[in-house]
Amino acid sequence: MGPGSCFRLARAKMADDEGAGVPREQVQGGTQVQFSQVLGGQALRCVSGAPWSVTRTPLNSVRVQRRSKSKSYRLSLRSCLGAASRLGLTPALTARRLNTSRRAPKSHNITEKVNPEQLNLLVKTEWQLSYVTPLYQFRHTQLKSYSRQLSAFIAAEKQQGLAVEVEGTHGSFRVSFCVVQGMAEADDDAETVLIQIHSKPLFAGKDEPPKAVWSGWLTCINGSPDYLRSLPKDFTCMPLFCSSGADGLTSLVKSWFQRTFDCCFGQLEISHTSLQWLVALWTNCHTESAIQHLKMMWTLPAVPPLKVTYTVNGPDAWQLWSSVRKQQHSESNEEEEEENSIDIEEVMQFMQGLKSHFYRHFRLDLSAGSLDQVSTALGSAKCSGRIKISKSKYMITTLTLLTECALLKMPI
Amino acid sequence: MAAKLNLSGQPDSETSSLNDQTVSSRSSNRSVRVAEKERRKIEAEDPFVLALKYFTDVEAGTPVTGNDEVEKHLVLVEKAAYSRGLSPEAISNMLEFAMSLRMGTTLCARVLKCLIPATAVPQEAVVRAVVWLGVGKIPITTQVLFIKWVLTVFDMIDAKDQLRAIYGFIFSFVTDENLCPYICHLLYLLTRKESVRVFRVRKLLELQSKLGRQPFLLHLLSLYKVFCPELVTLSIPSRMRSGFRNHNSPWKSVLIGVQKRNGSQVASSIAPSAFMVKDKTNSRKRKYCHLEMPALNCVINKQAETGTSSSRKLVPVVQLNSFAQLLENMHHIELPAQMGSLLGSSLALQYLDCVQDESALLRLNFWLGYALHEEFLFCSDGGASQNSEEALQFLNKLLSTQHFLQEGFSSSEAFLYKFLNVWDGSLFRPEILGLLSNIPVIPSSQIGRLLFEPLMQLFFTSSLFFKCGLMECLNNMLLKWLTWHSVYALEDDLDISLNSHTSINMTLSGFKDSVMELVLFVGRLASVGLQLEGCHSLLLSFILDFYETVCDTFLKYGLPLVLMPPPGVFYPALFATDPVNVDRLAYIMYRYKVNLTSAKSQERVTEQAFHISRQTFREFNNYGVVMANCLWNSKMFHPGMGVQLGEELLLKSNVPQYSASFDLIHHPAFMSYAVDFHQRCWPGRKDMDLNSIKLSKPWSWYLEYLFTQGYDGLKQFFQGNISRQQTAGDGQGDSVSSRQR
């Protein structure tokens, strides 16, 4: 299993508690990092494997056109191979992995494309992530009707369990669906849909304005074109669902979507590897938009588990990062920025550098533990699947990564 | 009324409704009446009726201890209640008996626990019982139990007006600290606008100041506030969990069971919403509920299609009740909102069987794949072990669906490839192996990585039973592949399509490669497996099952491919200690021969170039010669055979007549037959000389004797291969199948 594979096996517990003696200390950054260590660091284990590789079934050269058989029910015998040809990728035959290289984040002038009011709703909130299987017969043109239906659904569900018809509760939730125009990056991406639920508290005064009690959005940013194109027209793929608000409402919204669009919701964790990607991607933005500090939370498998908070000053992190970047300085033409891509190896080297530095000071090898949380001035992410994006400029890069993670969770 | 005491559960509720229907025709009415009389007569002696009568009539103060009669009757009532539920009259009588404490307090609680209504609960009974509460002799725990019972069956109480009329009386119990939460719930269910009064609000507020902000008080107060905001000035948190805790635990499962048994007409007419709520809270509490089958619902969002299909009326699957209806509406059936719900009903499966809609199947596959992934792959903290019962049911449902459709779902296939890598080989073994045997043909280039690598690891690290299970699974897999081939292969034999709807075609040679890979893989597994397990005869038997499929690929399934078992399988089978396996090997060799001969002749006739390699013939001939020499000719270690040992070594072993040690007389599997035969042949002989069977006459008798014991495989092998039907001795083994060269 590569680190990018969608399921994690139970991490082998480390028997010796090597770090138990080390005080739970917060390491402040600002110390000079020894670069020699970084470059001469130990061999890295990297993920290999082509991203989204499409392995076609090796057919023999003789490919005779079949007689058209009377349509039999064989349809459901869609073998994986069948799916391969139909869905454009072989979900099971090629173990899907995270991309091993991605474009360096460049600041998007997203504020020009997207309505800033809507953008404000998306940033600075911590979202709980879920993945969603493709929606069946979802129409971006029918959002008004969906708003009505979901309001009615929530009202009906809230009434359940009340034996007496309670007037007043009805209609206390107002749902609004809207499209966030301009978020989509690639042509295949479906436009982002934002859902908000406003409520007037039951015992509030008459003229109090309804408050937004819940919001969530479905999105797809730079989704794998192979996957998206392979889906029949009836399906809309917005694999990433972010929600914030009462759990009860979240589950109501989810169950309405499930019933209406025959889709399924599952929890989306941000894996160790994805968090490391975020560390690198955010650090890479430092020159354009200061990250202030790079804060990482690690958990080491000691008894009891040892939590380590590791904070590095922005400039120091950047310095380390630029030292592991391969071609960045050799061809630092402004034009070539477009092609600028970051490789997983660089990410791993960067992480290794950070870990070695920590080891020099505290004699504690962070590679034994797992990265649980990352935060910079650009945003924060937790392995439990909570993410906050603080600067809209770089949100596209982050969302691209998350879309990819969500697509990896797709059952087929 | 009194005579109809027995209503519970007897099918008379149905007959009475029947009566209503037939009331128009007089003659039938009369006959029904006669029947009714008969029935009553019979019922008068029904022990259950007698039991109820006993409880109605029993005098107060009758002793309980040592009273066998009451015990006997009560057991009867309980039995009836738990199986079919009690009729309204029975409920009424039993409740009256319990609450009046005619026979003390112990029986009261026991009776309350078995008050399972079959249909409805008469309101009067409840009102009377509440009045008994006021008498105040009932212990507090029993009082609580009673109110809980009322809350449980609240939706089944036939009317509520009288209960509302004694609202004030019920309200007075609110001051009792133990009863308060339950009374609040009951009041909540009964409250109307007119029941909200200042003094009641004041009482509740007073209680609240005494007990603290208890949710049950808050709930009742919030309801009061909804009705009369001017009376309740208290601010109530807006984000309060709605609903009371449900208190129906003692009766819930039984009640649902009874309702299920009594048929849906009762369940649906009364539809105790209390339970639906309860179920919901249950599932909310559970973290993992991916395996819940979605309900069969109509599409809510119809606007999208109305434009196109307005001309035809679509019939939702939900509305179909019979296969005939399904056929009638075949061409205008509307799929359910959630395709996953189709797995739940057999009628829907029949429809799924002929669904042409690609999207529909994709939806089903998305749901199925999601459920499988979430349950078995993504759950990090052993969710599978927590609800193994549910998972088991789910897998079994999936399996039966796949058996019904005779094919696997692509999502379960994709899931299996991932799951095999993390499987311990014991979790849901039969189910997982069942699913595995349904996967369609995998191209030979992928089969190793997807299937063989994980299976090999599992095979060599698991128990004998897993090995047998896996062999059976692989045999089933091969059978299915071959069946698909024989059904779907085209006549021109150039191309088979595994799947009529996708563009994927597999050439015949591609398919042959995959089958070959599979057979060779099983050969490797089997050889090593037999060594590891000391040639266990159970494992050997499963392996021979597999080769029984393999040897007939050409004749039975039309696949021009003949593959011989490896020596690691052949020799253990030949030297097996149980005669059945040896016999099966002989049968397999016989079928190989038939297949090869037929392939050869067909090759000659059609001159079509499918080539069975010379190597295969050579292997077959070699095995044939070994078998004949070993079993018939007593030329065990003959030079030039598969098993060779040095002369000196054999002499050193001190085995007399070593070359005959595996013939049909001395073979460990057949020795007992030889002894038996010897005794029958020469009953008088004292010293046993098995070699005397070798003489020509007894030898042919001995063979006949063996064949009559049911060893048809040996018989067929013998008749097919030993050309000169002749006596013991020499040389005829050489003629074995040599003409195939």
Image: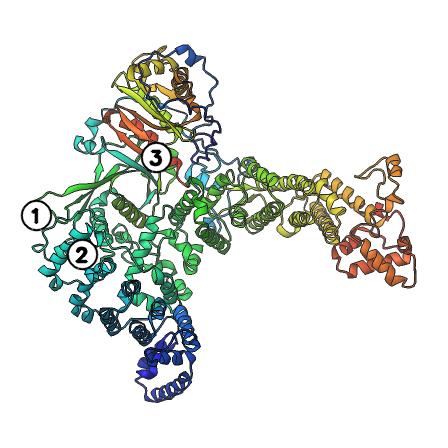
What chain does mark 1 sit on?
A
Looking at the image, which is closer to me, B249 or A237? B249
Whether residue B741 can be seen here: no
Which three-letter amino acid code belongs to the residue tagged 2? Answer: Leu
Pointer 3 residue:
A384
Look at the picture and state if A274 lies above or below B463: above
What is the spatial separation of the Cα atoms under label 1 and label 2, in whole angstroms? 23 Å
What chain does mark 2 sit on?
B
Callout 2 secondary element: helix
Residue A407 location, x and y as percent?
37, 36
Which three-letter amino acid code belongs to the residue tagged 3? Answer: Ser
Label 1 crowd bin: few (<14), some (14–19), many (20+), radius 10 Å: few
Residue A334 location, x and y as percent?
29, 13
Label 3 crowd bin: few (<14), some (14–19), many (20+), radius 10 Å: some
Is residue A357 toward the left or the right of residue B440 in the image? Answer: left
Residue B705 location, x and y as percent?
82, 60
Callout 3 secondary element: loop
- Is there CB contact under 8 Å for labels 1 and 3? no
Looking at the image, which is closer to me, A65 or B351? B351
Residue B220's mark?
2
- Is there CB contact under 8 Å for labels 1 and 2? no
Residue B709 location, quadrant: bottom right
Which three-letter amino acid code belongs to the residue tagged 1? Answer: Lys
What is the spatial separation of the Cα atoms under label 2 and label 3, in whole angstroms? 38 Å
Looking at the image, which is closer to me, B236 or B317? B236
Pointer 1 residue:
A206
What chain does mark 3 sit on?
A
Whether residue A93 can be seen here: yes
Q: Residue at x 85, y 53 (%)?
A: B724
